[in-house]
Image: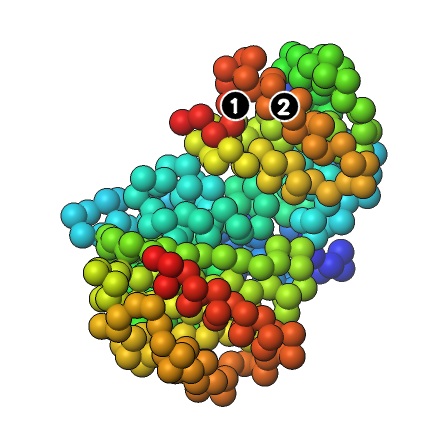
Amino acid sequence: MTISFILNGEDMIHTAESHQSLLSVMQQHFTLAQSHAPCEKTYCQRCLILLDNKLMLACRVPFFMVRRKEVITLEGWKLTEEYRLLKNHMEKSSVVFCPSCTDLRLFTYHSCGEALAIGEPWELQRLMSDIPCRCGTMEEVTQALETYGDKRGGNHVGKK
Amino acid sequence: MWEKSSSAPLVNAPPSLQAALNLLNRNPNIQIWAGGTALPSKPADQILSLNLVDEIKKITPWERFVDWGAGLSLNQLVLQGKNLLPPLLLSALKTLGNYPLRNQGTLGGNLCSEPGGDLFPLLQALGAQAEFRSAKGFRWEASSQWPARGLKPLPGEILCRIRIPKETWNLTLFEKLGTHRSAGEEQVSYFVLARITRETISALRMGIYFPSAGLLRNRALEANLQGRKLPFTPQDKELIYKAWEEEFPFLTKPLAPFQSSRLTSITDWMIKQIREE
């Protein structure tokens, strides 16, 4: 099937099998999400995307679902000002930057503002722990994000 | 997603519920697609995507109950209906899958999956009703008539709404052991809903749900414990254990030894919580 959608700010018209996952389409045709081999079982969270501003897993999104929608991948989000600010803050907070998970944690944090604003104080911790990694930097990333939320006034965990 | 060898299905995405029902009436075997978190092993020839159907994504509060659209995503339930959701459901919703999965998974999908998702026994306990619509009309199914392992729409039907009564409980407890990454047997959730006045139980609903085996809930026990003074006596405790044993034959699979030992400790914990309340 041929559908139109927006990928990282660019209009796309693309043809693929309707039941193919968005992840495989991105990997095969757009050279995106290449840096890792996702589990395709929703566990690893290495294929996070924003579909119409909602955080989803590309391995579970069939191609037909992106029709007339906007897709932002991690690669696309890394070109934004928000990412630059977050990364600067991580560097200032002396967080050891794990190439496998830190970007994903920042992407998750950026995408879950609404949930964090109305959530419990431990909501951020839970979101971060959903992304499995053996690097052991989860605690320091979470702490740095908490201070980032305090400074910016947005994404303030646990504040109604 | 699906096996690469399978042929691509034809996807229909009607813009309204009536169009979806008409399509379903013409082809009752079409595969209904809402969130898509639980994929069937093989795709059907045709898929009916409900993504564009807004009628099933509404929250309608009434005086004595709230109607929840079956197409609402699990995160939409939390974010949009936070003030209307029973606390039991709110705490359960946050334990389902992970955040991106909850953006995709829908209320209807959780209830219609085989076996029913974690919300299924809770909605049964809350006395919910499900509305199914077809091109010929609609029907309501009360939770007492729900099948044991998830809702089953008849051919040509779509689950459209879930009606949850507004009731207040002074003890609400929901806990889940294991995550979506755990093996099926390692997952267990349990709940207690109780109304306690002057140390007397005026209403009680409690259950333990093993997704791999089924729900342990004994309505006779709940009726039996109504009017009891707290704290529970050792005889009451015995009564509860016995009630669980009575339910064992209705489980789809016998409990593994570690599940039985969990059952004992969970029951103790539930009793302790009720007593402390």
Residue that protrudes farthest toward the left in the picture: B63
Letter of the chain that mark 2 sits on in the rendering: A
The kind of residue tagged 2 is Leu
Q: Earlier in the sequence, mark 2 or mark 1?
A: 2
Q: In which image quadrant can residue B145 be found? A: bottom left
Q: What crowding class fits label 2: few (fewer than 14 Cα within 10 Å), some (14-19), or many (20 or more)?
A: many
Q: Which mark is residue B276?
A: none
Decide which of B275, A66 is in the foreground and name it: B275
Secondary structure at numbered mark 2: helix
Q: Which residue is mark 1?
A: A155
Spatial CA span between label 2 and label 1 = 9 Å
Mark 2 and 1 residues: CB-CB less than 8 Å, in contact? yes
Q: Which residue is mark 2?
A: A145
Q: Is residue B193 visible?
A: yes
| Vertical comparison of A81 with B236: above or below | above
Decide which of A63, B123 is in the foreground and name it: B123
